[in-house]
Image (tube, grey):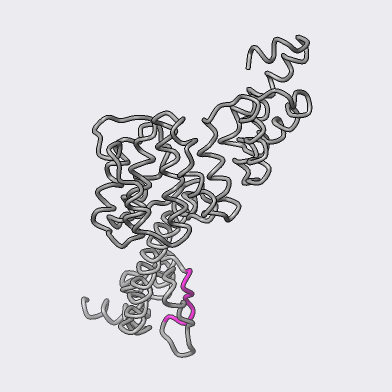
């Protein structure tokens, strides 16, 4: 690519290079944006094989398989490389032509591929078999020495994952679980979801915190707080109920009005002040009368014995005098 860009004006070459860098950065995370950058680079340098290849991968990531196949074919013609053969076959699968993909898997062009390319071609062929409903044939297609090798290569996790998936489709769940576990062990960069598939087979459920359909953690906390508040409210209500029961019991066993003054304070909310009635001995004394004033009034009404002796009639005094004489 560098040699191709050197033949272009420097400003144009720099601009194209920047767009290709953005395609490489965004093709996995934001494929639509990567596709836009690729289209711009394609307009600037459509005769560069690297640009056509980048445009093909951006279209492939956005499932524009027909457009991707056209770009890959152009890049292959320009470069003469066979590296794009597996992904071209997979574009045929994406376009609904698995038979064509199998035909490409048997083409002599495959012999030009390196080990990684041959593994990719095997994966595409197994996928084509699955598309055609030939599950057992897909299982057999993936059985190769690289599958059972203890060495971990960049493609090891994907190969084991595809084999486990084919076994599961064939109804061989126990074997599928073992190979999902092996795929998870080899998947050091998270290129597959083997760990999640293994957990599902083991009956473990995952909740994605970022999933808008999943239960919000704030809602869980609010629910817990609501339950705590409800418990406190119920406890308070139980306390009020017990207090009301005691009040009801007090009303039922409340003393009579005649003895209430001795047992209940005049300010008690359970009894009202007694209104004096006509004929009562203390009718002229109100509930507010203080004890001292009551005793003073009795003293005024009942004269002492000394006063009564002083006020005796004079006839009685004379009679007593004559008796003495």
Left or right of 207 in this view: 7: right
Left or right of 42 in this view: 241: left
Quadrant containing the N terminus is top right
Residue 3 on image: x %, y %: 65, 12
Most foreground residue, 182 or 274: 182
Instruction: Pick out the residue farthest to the front.
Output: 108
Residue 218 on image: x %, y %: 49, 49
The stretch drawn in magenta includes residue 192: no
Q: Quadrant of residue 184?
A: top left
| Residue positioned 42% across, 77% down in the render | 271
Most foreground residue, 256 or 215: 215
Residue 109 on image: x %, y %: 49, 35
The stretch drawn in magenta includes residue 285: yes
Quadrant containing the C terminus is bottom left
Left or right of 105 in this view: 295: left
Residue 248 on image: x %, y %: 36, 80
In the displayed structure, 48 sits above or below 26; it is: above
| Residue positioned 36% across, 49% down in the render | 141
Most foreground residue, 283 or 56: 56
Most foreground residue, 142 or 110: 110
> What range is drawn magenta here?
282-288
| Residue positioned 67% across, 39% down in the render | 70
Left or right of 83 in this view: 270: left
In the displayed structure, 214 sits above or below 104; it is: below
């Amino acid at each position: 690519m560098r040699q191709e860009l050197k033949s272009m004006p420097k400003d144009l070459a720099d601009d194209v290079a920047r767009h290709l860098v953005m395609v490489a950065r965004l093709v996995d995370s934001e494929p639509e944006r990567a596709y836009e950058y690729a289209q711009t680079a394609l307009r600037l340098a459509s005769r560069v094989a690297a640009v056509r290849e980048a445009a093909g991968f951006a279209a492939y990531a956005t499932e524009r398989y027909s457009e991707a196949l056209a770009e890959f074919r152009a890049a292959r013609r320009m470069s003469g490389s066979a590296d794009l053969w597996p992904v071209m076959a997979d574009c045929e699968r994406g376009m609904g032509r698995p038979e064509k993909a199998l035909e490409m898997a048997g083409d002599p062009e495959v012999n030009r591929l390196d080990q990684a390319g041959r593994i990719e071609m095997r994966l595409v062929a197994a996928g084509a078999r699955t598309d055609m409903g030939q599950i057992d044939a897909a299982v057999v297609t993936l059985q190769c020495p690289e599958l059972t090798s203890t060495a971990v290569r960049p493609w090891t996790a994907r190969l084991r994952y595809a084999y486990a998936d084919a076994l599961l489709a064939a109804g061989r769940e126990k074997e599928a679980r073992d190979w999902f576990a092996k795929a998870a062990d080899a998947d050091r960069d998270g290129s597959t979801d083997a760990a999640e598939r293994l957990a599902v087979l083991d009956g473990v459920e995952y909740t994605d915190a970022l999933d808008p359909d999943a239960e919000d953690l704030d809602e869980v906390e609010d629910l817990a707080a609501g339950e705590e508040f409800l418990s406190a409210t119920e406890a308070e209500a139980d306390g009020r109920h017990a207090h009301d029961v005691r009040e009801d019991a007090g009303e039922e066993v409340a003393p009579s009005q005649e003895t209430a003054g001795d047992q209940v304070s005049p300010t008690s909310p359970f009894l009202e002040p007694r209104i004096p009635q006509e004929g009562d001995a203390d009718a002229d004394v109100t509930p507010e009368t203080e004890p001292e004033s009551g005793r003073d009034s009795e003293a005024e009404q009942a004269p002492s014995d000394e006063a009564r002796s002083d006020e005796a009639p004079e006839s009685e005094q004379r009679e007593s005098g004559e008796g003495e004489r």
